[in-house]
Amino acid sequence: MFYYVLKYVLLGPLLRVLFRPRIEGLDHVPASGAAIVAGNHLSFSDHFLMPAVLRRRITFLAKAEYFTGPGLKGRLTAFFFRSAGQIPVDRTGKEAGQAAIREGLGVLGRDELLGIYPEGTRSHDGRLYKGKVGVAVMALRAGVPVVPCAMIGTFEAQPPGRKIPRLHPVVIRFGEPLDFSRYAGMEGEKAVLRAVTDEIMYAILSLSGQEYVDRYAAEVKAEEAERAAKGPRFPRRPSR
């Protein structure tokens, strides 16, 4: 119930007024039945802008940290994210991927829309990174179409580290649904999962026009953080 209050009364109208998003290809999102909407992830605002423009309710898999904060603020944040249609998923440990898949299949089993960011994390530099195969596993197991989606302009509106978004034009572009029924029963084949995931990422890339990096975003982030922690290296002065 509170989801629709946020969407139509509180948050949705405010986001539309502030960002005035241009929506393209909305008719590509099925009017009924289960489907996955797979998008790029550039900003914290993505969690709210996409649901605000969709005609149907959509449920996202979100990192568990949003739901486990301490004190009153943490409880309010958890309530807000749950009300906004987010499901907490622990991304640490060996079972993290399987837990996300179970939760996602549960949403699809109810004939609902499931929102996924195949990159697994927000892009820290505006580029599009290699997708993780969980989206392919869910699409093949559930036998549902995947609608690619590109968020354009949200990185400039609210890049990582910025708490209050700045006003910036935003485009939300949906592509034609991708049908992977030709791979039915092959969700256990690694090569098939990689091929399906890459096809989804290429569709997102075609919509967004981003620069593509054939590496996982989390790996690149970790490497850059490690380099930053070590600090700049200065050449030694030659001895006299």
Image (tube, rainbow, N blue to C red):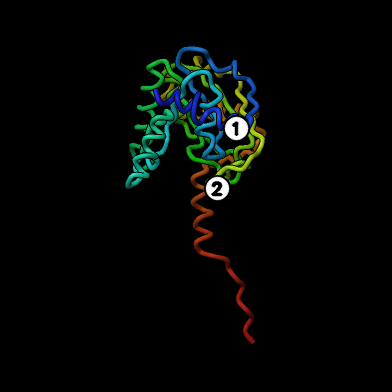
| Residue at figure coordinates x 47%, y 31% from the top left | 133
**Dot 1: within a 10 Å radius of its alpha carbon, few (fewer than 14), some, or many (20 or more) residues?**
many
| Residue at figure coordinates x 41%, y 34% from the top left | 81
**Dot 2: within a 10 Å radius of its alpha carbon, few (fewer than 14), some, or many (20 or more) residues?**
few
Image mark for residue 151: 1
**Residue 191 is at least partly visible in this image:** no
| Residue at figure coordinates x 63%, y 29% from the top left | 21
Q: Depth check: give the residue in front, 89 or 204.
A: 89
Quadrant position of the C terminus in the picture: bottom right
Q: N-terminal of the two: label 1 or label 2? A: 1
Residue 119 in picture, x, y percent from top left: 51, 36
Q: Is residue 60 above or below residue 228?
A: above
**Residue 124 is at least partly visible in this image:** yes
Q: Label 2 is placed on what type of residue?
A: Arg
Q: Secondary structure at mark 1?
A: strand
**Circle 1/circle 2 CB separation < 8 Å:** no
**Residue 210 location, quadrant:** top right
**Residue 59 location, quadrant:** top left
Q: Depth check: give the residue in front, 132 or 207.
A: 207
Q: Give left or right: position of 146 versus 92.
A: right
Image mark for residue 177: none
Q: Which residue matches tag 2?
A: 162
Residue 128 in picture, x, y percent from top left: 59, 38
